[in-house]
Image (cartoon, rainbow, N blue to C red):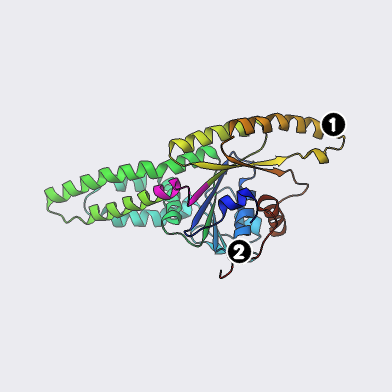
Amino acid sequence: MTTPFARLLEPRAATRYLFFGGKGGVGKTTLATATATRMADLGFRTTIVSTDPTVSLGAMFGQEVGALTPEPVAAVPGLSALTINPTAATGPFQDRLAGMMQQASTALGDIVSTPCAAEMAAFDQFVGFLDRPQGDVVVFDTAPTGTTLRELAMPFDWAGFLQKQIVASREVARLMGFDNTSATALEADKQRYDRALEVLRDRERTTFTLVLTPERLPVEETRSAASGLQTLGIPVQALVVNQTILPEVVEGNRFLQARSAVQRRYLDEIDRSFGELLRTRLPLLDRDVSDVQTLRHLGDLLFGPERQPVAGR
């Protein structure tokens, strides 16, 4: 890898977690899949996880992609893919909660039966990748900004809830003469979420990249996302400004001249507003990015010319 963005994302000793977030429609899935493909091509064992069930990683790779277990990508050796589906995740999540409830807590039983059970199940599956990493690199293609911020806030809320349940479970066990099985299970789960929070906040292990296009609404939503992530203690380290119109392609076309002028204003605003972040611009391509060959071409634009696979991997 040769570009500053490539050096920022390059795996080190521990598993690297690479998040791509931003407004819907700005190219998060395209950049996440291009990054995952490049990492696998370099010899890193890589998993790409989409937290947005409306996104089809299968369409990008031309094959079925699982909802509970990562599926190997036939066209990219060393790469596996999974799209978290809340409906599919609910059953295993409910089974795990039932195992924790044991004697004492009715609160966990209430959660299993509420409408938020599917959302909680998807979040719980997401946490599993942070707590038990699969491979050298895990790339997350996240849902649009608002949903992502809500999902990332869940470990904070859920860890606090579990702490209250631990105290209540121990008190009930003491009063009723039960053993402390429930409290022990709850404590183990709380530690699991605490570890996930540590990973999300660790700049050496996790890189959160926001993707945007040089237009008003994506710029405003990127500001909001960066602020929301900062509130959670999750640092944003990079921006990718996608679909920029290069001056050399305008060639007297009035439409492209007008769009390029609009983009220049927002490109200047992005530089002023996000000067502390590493920023990378990608051009508007003249073709659809929907196959592995084009993903690899995009990887060259994002990371620089492909180098040899990592020795020993």
- Residue 204 on the magenta span: yes
Camera-nearest label, 1 or 2: 1
Question: Quick one: label 2, few (<14), some, or many (20+) residues within 10 Å?
Answer: many
Residue in the picture at 59% in, 49% down = 55
In the rendered image, residue 286, in percent from the top left (x then y), is placed at 78, 47
Residue highlighted by disc 2 = 73
Left or right: residue 57 compared with residue 206: right
Outermost residue, bottom side:
312
As rendered, which of 225 and 204 lies closer to the eye? Answer: 204
Q: What residue type is labelled 2?
A: Val
Q: Is mark 2 on a helix, strand or loop?
A: loop
Q: Please tell me which of labels 1 and 2 falls first in the chain.
A: 2
Q: Tell me if 8 is positioned left or right of 14 in this view.
A: right
Q: Which of 118 and 62 is in front in this view?
A: 62
Task: Count how many numbered circles sit on residues in the image.
Answer: 2
Disc 1 versus disc 2: distance between alpha carbons? 43 Å
Q: What stretch is highlighted in magenta?
A: 197-207
The residue under the point 41% across, 51% down is 124
- What residue is shown with label 1? 254
- Secondary structure of the residue carrying numbered label 1: helix
The type of residue carrying mark 1 is Arg
Inspect the magenta stretch and tell me whether residue 40 lies in it: no
Q: In which quarter of the image is the C terminus?
A: bottom right
